[in-house]
Amino acid sequence: ADLDDEQASDVFTVKVIGADTGEGVGAAFEAMDIDGDGTMDLLFGARSAGINGEGAVFIAYGPLSGTIDAETDYDAKLVGDSSSDHIGREVRDLGDALGTGDPVVGIGGWEDDGNGVDAGTLFLVTNPGL
């Protein structure tokens, strides 16, 4: 496609939209085959999702098409523990980082309170969404 001066909303194949104002969908995302079916799946963060900005990471299994609404069109959702954790600000495929043969996802919670107020946490999740 010729993308010279085109608006993204006019030429998208797949579009992911946030469920509410200020969620921050699209700041972090990763494509990987989570469920082992040979099709790429999408993980996307919404760092300020939730009533108190807990944040969330959503999983949408592929193949993908059309518009994905973060309020309803996902297969799994991981949420922050408490107010302003901002889970999902970072989402990364870490391969087999734990040596188990299973996919691992790194999820950043830059203001998670697990070890003190706003200390931050990096969560390693094996087989997210399964």
Image (cartoon, rainbow, N blue to C red):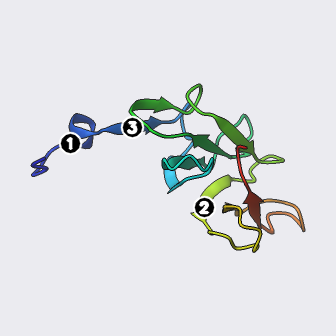
Residue visible at 69% across and 53% down in the picture: 86
Is 16 located above or below residue 88 in the figure? above
Q: Earlier in the sequence, mark 2 or mark 1?
A: 1
Residue ID for mark 3: 15
Residues at marks 1 and 3 touching, judged by CB atoms closer than 8 Å: no
Q: CA distance from mark 2 to mark 1?
A: 26 Å
Q: Amino acid at mark 2?
A: Glu
Q: Nearer the viewer, residue 105 or 46?
A: 105
| Disc 3 element | strand
| Disc 1 element | loop
Q: Amino acid at mark 1?
A: Gln
Q: Earlier in the sequence, mark 1 or mark 3?
A: 1
Q: CA distance from mark 1 to mark 3?
A: 13 Å
| Disc 2 element | strand
Dot 3: within a 10 Å radius of its alpha carbon, few (fewer than 14), some, or many (20 or more) residues? some
Q: Position of residue 25 (x, y in %)?
A: 52, 44
Q: Amino acid at mark 3?
A: Lys
Residue ID for mark 1: 7
Is 18 located above or below residue 92 in the figure? above
